[in-house]
Image (cartoon, rainbow, N blue to C red):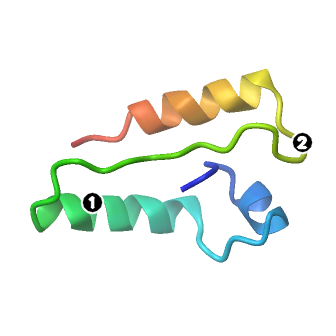
Amino acid sequence: MQETHDNLLATIGRIHSYKDFENTYYMARKIGFENINVDIMIGLPRSNFNRCRRNHTKNCQIKS
């Protein structure tokens, strides 16, 4: 997962959506993964400080 906005994921050539990431995350948790890394890419097209902050906030709200 590099970004939470699907339109930007498509712009950078990613074939997954944020919902795909969430589903995979919860599946991994369900089968026992306890340590899951999330990388957020900074400096993407149309990216700015507020968008990065929203990405961070959204990812921090994921329930484990």
| Foreground of the two, 63 or 2 | 2
- Tell me: 28 left or right of 4: left
Q: What x and y, as percent, mark residue 56? A: 54, 30
Quadrant of the snapshot with the C terminus: top left
Residue underneath mark 1: 26
Badge 2 amino acid: Arg
Q: What x and y, as percent, mark residue 4? A: 61, 48
Tag 1 or tag 2, which sits nearer the N-term? 1
- Tell me: 13 left or right of 23: right
- Which residue is farthest bottom? 15
Q: Which quadrant of the structure image shows residue 63?
A: top left
Rendered view: 35 above or below 51: below
Q: What x and y, as percent, mark residue 32? A: 9, 61
- Tell me: 19 left or right of 61: right
Crowding at dot 2, Cα within 10 Å, few <14 / some 14-19 / many 20+, comes out as few
Picture residue at 23% right of the left edge, 64% below the top: 28
Quadrant of the snapshot with the N terminus: bottom right
Rendered view: 30 above or below 37: below
Crowding at dot 1, Cα within 10 Å, few <14 / some 14-19 / many 20+, comes out as some
Picture residue at 72% right of the left edge, 61% below the top: 9
